[in-house]
C-alpha cells in the first residue's frame, strides 16, 4: 500500500509540475522562463526541489532570503557563476529591475546553463505574500 501511494504521489507531482510550467510562465526565443512568486511557492508546496539563487547584495541576503537560497550577488556573478548548479531547477531572483535579472539570465545562458527560470517579481513579492523567509 505504501509503494502505491509513493507512485501516485510521483505521478501527481509530475502532473502538477508540468501544468505549472506550461501555464504560469512565459518563454522567449532567448530561453527565458519567468513566473511570479506564487508559482514558485506552488512548486515548493508540491514538493519540487528548487534551487534559489539570490542575486541581491550579500547584506540584503543576510537580512532574509527564500528558503534554502544561495547568495551570488549580481555584481559578483561574472566571477562566481560556477557556483550556480548546472543541474536541478534553478530560479534566479532579486529585488532589482527586471532588466538586471534578465541580463543575469542571459549571461548564464551564454555560459551554457539551460536549467534556469526567473521569479519575475522577486524577493519583495515573496515577502508581500507572507511566504516563509530564512534569516
Image (cartoon, rainbow, N blue to C red):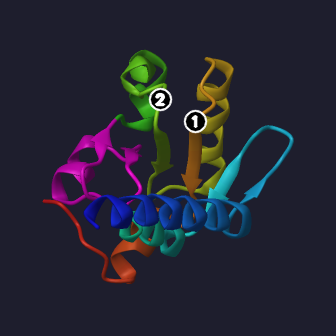
Could you tell me residue 106's position as x and y percent? Answer: 67, 33
| Residue ID for mark 2 | 87
Near mark 1 (Cα within 10 A), the count class, few <14, some 14-19 or many ≥20, is some
Dot label at residue 115? 1
> Which quadrant of the rendered structure holds the N terminus?
bottom left
Relative side of 60 to 62, left or right: right
Task: Decide which of 114, 106 is in the foreground and name it.
Answer: 114
Q: Residue furthest left?
A: 135
Q: Residue furthest front?
A: 1
Give how far apart the Cα atoms at labels 1 and 2 are.
6 Å
- Circle 1/circle 2 CB separation < 8 Å: yes
Find out whether residue 53 is within the magenta segment.
yes
Residue at the spot 57% in from the left edge and 40% down from the top edge: 116
Relative side of 77 to 58, left or right: right
Task: Decide which of 72, 132 is in the foreground and name it.
Answer: 132
Q: Which residues are magenta?
A: 47-71
Q: Relative to 19, is 30 above or below?
A: above
Residue at the spot 17% in from the left edge and 58% down from the top edge: 63
Task: Decide which of 123, 21 is in the foreground and name it.
Answer: 21
Amino acid at each position: 500500500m505504501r509503494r502505491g501511494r509513493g507512485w501516485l504521489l510521483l505521478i501527481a507531482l509530475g502532473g502538477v509540475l508540468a501544468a505549472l510550467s506550461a501555464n504560469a510562465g512565459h518563454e522567449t526565443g532567448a530561453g527565458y522562463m519567468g513566473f511570479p512568486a506564487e508559482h514558485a511557492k506552488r512548486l515548493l508546496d508540491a514538493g519540487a526541489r528548487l534551487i534559489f539563487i539570490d542575486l541581491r547584495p550579500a547584506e540584503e541576503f543576510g537580512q532574509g532570503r527564500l528558503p534554502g537560497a544561495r547568495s551570488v550577488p549580481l555584481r559578483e556573478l561574472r566571477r562566481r557563476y560556477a557556483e550556480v548548479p548546472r543541474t536541478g531547477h534553478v530560479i534566479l531572483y532579486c529585488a532589482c529591475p527586471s532588466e538586471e535579472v534578465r541580463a543575469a539570465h542571459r549571461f548564464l545562458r551564454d555560459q551554457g546553463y539551460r536549467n534556469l527560470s526567473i521569479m519575475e517579481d522577486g524577493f519583495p513579492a515573496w515577502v508581500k505574500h507572507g511566504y516563509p523567509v530564512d534569516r
